Image (cartoon, coloured by chain):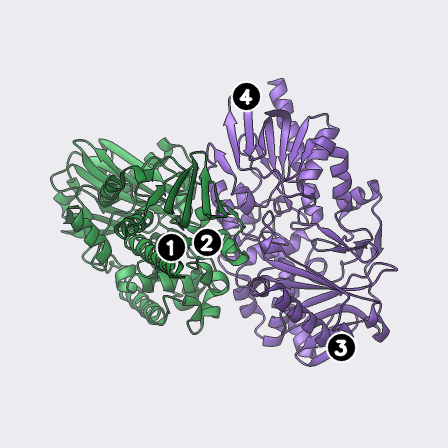
Chain colours: A purple, B green
């Protein structure tokens, strides 16, 4: 049996950031990670001559100050996401290039869409990020799905469909599953509609992959980090908390669980969690997303002055983007969120590949037909993540048990991007949540030491 | 390490019914139950001279044919639920007695309510119980909450509030959290609006408690039943499945997991469950309910020709009923569903008791003030149930991953009242689900034996 001041469960960016802050404050820590790697929902693979592809989170944008600070500290280089040329709007067999974030749709469609976005922006601006359930009108907004709100406020079918695709890609769940209050909260937490829903803030990628800073923190942690150590139980014992699994047992005065709520709920707690916290773990499921990359000798779409970004309105692959590293082979990324991800997850890898390549061909022509490499990650199949990008709130959850999200239970504290009040669901949110949980632990420790 | 043909996980009515059917077919079984008792969401305590009170499921009604058969086989006596006299409608300080199921509300309110119920009945009649997602219009009904449907179809505020209270009591979750398609499915599975939402079918209680037949089956199972044996992991091994926990290990060719999906999801599966099944366990949470009984020397409310049934529209305790056993002390039951159950769960037991007794006093007068006994069960706090009456479908789940509900994963089969196509959420559904899972296992076994 091992001992530590604090055990951190999970070595994604949240857990690693917490561990780093605690160690900097002189605490003895043990980090237990279920998988054989760190990074959580950031996962970088290598292709060809060691070029990075990010099968998980990848972007860093202007508001991501903590992530930028980590990147700088660990010397992780970024580059501007390729944006030269035209984006594509694909509707069936029709492909239309367009510049910027405003797709080439009839003026009426654009006007009603802009009106709806303005209404969403105005509603989102009212959200109290620390306590969304206390926002005026919260009960009513939480008792409806985002689909219901869009049906009422965006009756024009084509505009609504575009909004549904954009929101679905942002949350990785269909608008018919998510609470309108939760959607507004997510949008507000990402800086508003322009920042959260449009492509405006998708600014930079990591040359060497988005998990670089995570691996650098892991290297610093050395023996304090245990991989392949899934936690099965957290038990209160006379001297603190016992954290157990097939790996053995670690005892500590405090624990930070840095997992999404659904996974945190799969740990057996003794004493059992109070009703509200337990129900939060039951009622805050993960979204679903499949991410794939097709690699080509060169970024051939640039010959046609295309950015590689396509919005595909009637296709299993609604969003593609250019993930080519500077000087590296051409790389097209594809995101399949929500229901389509579930449908594709049920197919064979070969069928999935055929469907995704088919979408790329529809957008970028026959040159996309024969990639030299192809990588994919079905996040709902990952045993220690079980979905992505993050968890979401179905209707009725935020206003009934939402306040259990960050509330410590005894000496057990909660981190993870879902617990962030800003940039929820992003690596930035994960880092901030870990630092917040570490600060909680240190504050509690101080009180205990004084008391 | 033990061996069996089939391991059954969970000794509620579903697991026990499966075990009983398998044993009758000559299979060697082991039943693993996490709690120190059988019955699951049926839980009987004793008061005074050994009079039963059912802190969980208690009613048996006309359509409950399998439950009736079990009751008869094990000699579990029932009696007609007391119905002589008037019910009460309580609104603030105003109490109004009424006969039958039609509350004393203005004619307009009753008319719009009847219209809405007729519409619900008509929509429910279309539901394909085996495949609700294949019902015409399913996508649209599943993309909205029941609250949204009621707002549109029952704009009269008082009628809507009454419908919300009745539905909330039926599902143990607020109408703002549940999918309209799921509500219709539940109603249809319980025989329609009249049977499912009104009190008409609440017909009989068990003299000796609703867990009597469960305890009788448990006695027959003898050593094959292991209590206090929470299952932590189910792993595929060369010769079948290994079922493990702190109790040890049992190996079997087949496993029936007879738990609600959220609890089934807390078992660690190796290989991991496919995405759709895993997400179903994340997205099908338990409702929340608190059940309490106040015991009095005699059923004093009968002096005023009251049934003990009250519908309390602006109160944490919306529903009360008479649970007096023939010849026993007076017993008033109280149900607190959904959000109110969560609010009360966060209070101390003393505060909860004061609130519940307060409600009984408002309905039945000062004679209710000093019960000689008081029992309560906060189901969301029960570590091996974590809610009640059953699980529910938030919007968007049925139409995306609903088909994973009963689909076996290799040799792992799923039972539990949630998997029943009729009487879902009732003991009757649990029994039918267990018998269905046993039949699946026997059919699979036969195929294996022949092949």
Measure how far apart labels 2 and 3 are at the Cα level: 43 Å
Q: Residue at x 62, y 76 (%)?
A: A158
Q: Are both tags, 1 and 3, on one chain?
A: no
Measure how far apart labels 1 and 3 are at the Cα level: 48 Å
Residue A69 visible in rendering:
yes
The residue singled out by tag 4 in the image is A239
Using the image, name the chain to which the residue with label 4 belongs: A
Question: Pointer 2 and pointer 1: residues touching (CB < 8 Å)?
Answer: yes
Q: Which mark is residue A116?
A: none
Q: Are both tags, 2 and 1, on one chain?
A: yes
- Mark 3 closeness class: few <14, some 14–19, many ≥20 residues within 10 Å: few
Measure how far apart labels 4 and 2 are at the Cα level: 37 Å
The residue singled out by tag 2 in the image is B284
The secondary element bearing badge 2 is classed as loop
Measure how far apart labels 2 and 1 are at the Cα level: 9 Å
**Badge 2 or badge 1: first in the primary sequence:** 2
Please give left or right for residue B109 compared with residue A449 in the image. Answer: left
Question: Pointer 4 and pointer 2: residues touching (CB < 8 Å)?
Answer: no
Q: Nearer the viewer, mark 3 or mark 4?
A: 3
Q: Which residue appears farthest toward the bottom when viewing the image?
A: A93
The residue singled out by tag 1 in the image is B418
Q: Quadrant of the N terminus of chain A?
A: top right
Q: Quadrant of the C terminus of chain A?
A: top right
**Badge 3 or badge 4: first in the primary sequence:** 4
Residue B370 visible in rendering:
no
The secondary element bearing badge 1 is classed as helix
Please give left or right for residue A283 compared with residue A294 in the image. Answer: left
């Amino acid at each position: 049996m091992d001992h530590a001041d604090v055990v951190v469960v999970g070595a994604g960016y949240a857990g690693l950031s917490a561990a780093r802050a605690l160690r900097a404050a002189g605490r003895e820590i043990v980090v237990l990670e279920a998988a054989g790697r760190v990074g959580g929902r950031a996962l970088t693979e290598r292709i060809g001559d060691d070029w990075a592809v990010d099968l998980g989170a990848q972007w860093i944008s202007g508001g991501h100050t903590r992530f930028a600070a980590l990147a700088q500290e660990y010397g992780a280089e970024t580059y501007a996401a390729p944006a030269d040329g035209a984006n594509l709007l694909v509707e069936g067999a029709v492909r239309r290039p367009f510049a910027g974030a405003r797709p080439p749709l009839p003026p009426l469609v654009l006007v009603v869409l802009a009106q709806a976005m303005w209404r969403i922006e105005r509603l989102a601006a009212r959200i109290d990020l620390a306590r969304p359930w206390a926002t005026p009108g919260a009960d009513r907004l939480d008792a409806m799905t985002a689909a219901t709100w869009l049906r009422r406020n965006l009756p024009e079918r084509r505009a609504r469909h575009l909004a549904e695709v954009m929101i679905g890609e942002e949350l990785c769940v269909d608008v018919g599953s998510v609470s309108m209050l939760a959607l507004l909260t997510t949008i507000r937490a990402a800086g508003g509609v322009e920042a959260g829903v449009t492509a405006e803030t998708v600014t930079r990628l990591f040359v060497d992959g988005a998990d670089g800073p995570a691996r650098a923190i892991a290297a610093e942690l050395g023996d304090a980090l245990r991989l392949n150590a899934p936690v099965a139980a957290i038990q209160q014992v006379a001297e603190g908390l016992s954290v157990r699994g097939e790996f053995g047992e670690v005892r500590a005065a405090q624990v930070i669980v840095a997992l999404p709520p659904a996974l945190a709920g799969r740990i057996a707690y003794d004493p059992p969690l109070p009703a509200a916290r337990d129900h939060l773990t039951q009622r805050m499921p993960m979204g679903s997303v499949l991410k794939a990359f097709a690699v080509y000798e060169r970024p051939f779409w640039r010959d046609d002055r295309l950015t590689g970004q396509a919005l595909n309105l009637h296709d299993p692959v609604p969003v593609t983007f250019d993930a080519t590293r500077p000087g590296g082979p051409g790389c097209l990324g594809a995101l399949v969120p929500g229901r389509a991800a579930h449908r594709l997850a049920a197919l064979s890898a070969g069928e999935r590949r055929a469907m995704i390549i088919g979408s790329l061909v529809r957008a970028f022509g026959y040159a996309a037909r024969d990639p030299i490499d192809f990588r994919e990650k079905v996040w709902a199949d990952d045993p220690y993540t079980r979905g992505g990008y993050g968890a979401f709130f179905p209707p009725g959850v935020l206003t009934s048990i939402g306040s259990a999200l960050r509330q410590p239970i005894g000496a057990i504290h909660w981190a993870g991007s879902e617990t962030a009040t800003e940039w929820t669901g992003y690596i930035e949110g994960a880092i901030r949540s870990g630092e917040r949980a570490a600060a909680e632990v240190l504050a509690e420790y101080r009180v205990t030491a004084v008391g």
